[in-house]
Image (spheres, rainbow, N blue to C red):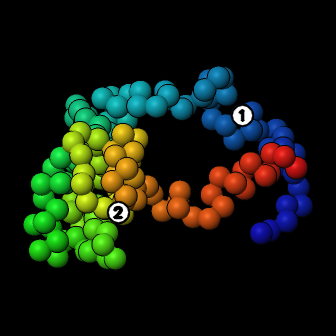
């Protein structure tokens, strides 16, 4: 960067407009030409002509599929046979990502012990699964000390 020996203000002394063009250009917004897309069909046409008149809808956030307990109890045997669900120590482990569902809802009952991984579980479904002797809940809830740290932080 070059050091300026003379201030620009002093350099422009004697020049009527101080490098700003006509006097009109100093007033208010000057030669800005509007705010936002103003003039998009006139003087800023070349900048906006590709997108002019096109309406785009917002894309909905993709929701994962939900499944009821009654459907799970019907399909359990088929999932175990095909290898989509695993049997560990008398508990059937269901992976939501493998089976293609994101949430389990509480319609119906489960007779076998199941453990849910990678899926959300409604309160009613979690209650029914735990009554059958299974496990339901996310990995964060199962971590030791989850929630306890917040409480201990408030007491101090």
Q: Quadrant of residue 56?
A: top left
Chain-order first, disc 1 or disc 2: 1
* For residue 6, side relative to residue 122 (left or right): right
Alpha-carbon neighbours of circle 2 within 10 Å: few (<14), some, or many (≥20)?
A: many
Residue closest to the eye, 46 or 80:
80
Q: Secondary structure at mark 2?
A: strand
Please report the residue visible at 31 percent of the width from the left and 61 percent of the height from the top. Answer: 113
Q: Nearer the viewer, mark 1 or mark 2?
A: 2
- How many numbered circles does the render carry? 2
Q: Quadrant of the N terminus?
A: bottom right
Residue closest to the eye, 138 or 106:
106
Please report the residue visible at 80 percent of the width from the left and 51 percent of the height from the top. Answer: 153
Residue closest to the eye, 131 or 22:
131
Residue for badge 1: 17
Give the answer, above or below, for where 149 lies relative to 48: below
Q: Quadrant of residue 143?
A: bottom right
**What's the distance in space between the residues labelled 1 and 2, CA to CA?**
79 Å
Residue 6 lies, in percent from the top left, at 88, 55
Q: Quadrant of residue 136?
A: bottom left
Residue 61 lies, in percent from the top left, at 31, 44
Please report the residue visible at 67 percent of the width from the left and 28 percent of the height from the top. Answer: 26
* For residue 154, side relative to residue 54 (left or right): right
Residue closest to the eye, 36 or 20:
36
Alpha-carbon neighbours of circle 1 within 10 Å: few (<14), some, or many (≥20)?
A: few
Q: Secondary structure at mark 1?
A: loop
Residue 10 lies, in percent from the top left, at 87, 45
Residue for badge 2: 115
The answer to whether residue 46 is seen in the rendering is no
The answer to whether residue 15 is seen in the rendering is yes
Give the answer, above or below, for where 78 lies relative to 69: below
């Amino acid at each position: 960067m070059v050091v300026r020996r003379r201030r620009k203000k002093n350099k422009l002394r004697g020049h009527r407009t101080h490098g700003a063009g006509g006097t009109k250009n100093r007033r208010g917004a000057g030669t800005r030409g509007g705010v936002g897309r103003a003039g998009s069909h006139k003087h800023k046409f070349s900048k906006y002509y590709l997108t002019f008149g096109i309406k785009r809808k917002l894309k909905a956030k993709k929701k994962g599929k939900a499944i009821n307990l009654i459907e799970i109890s019907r399909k359990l045997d088929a999932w175990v046979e095909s290898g989509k669900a695993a049997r560990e120590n008398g508990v059937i482990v269901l992976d939501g990502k493998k089976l293609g569902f994101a949430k389990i809802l509480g319609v119906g009952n489960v007779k076998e012990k199941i453990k849910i991984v990678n899926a959300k579980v409604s309160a009613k479904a979690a209650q029914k699964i735990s009554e059958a002797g299974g496990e339901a809940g996310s990995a964060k809830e199962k971590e030791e000390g989850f929630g306890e740290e917040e409480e201990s932080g408030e007491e101090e």
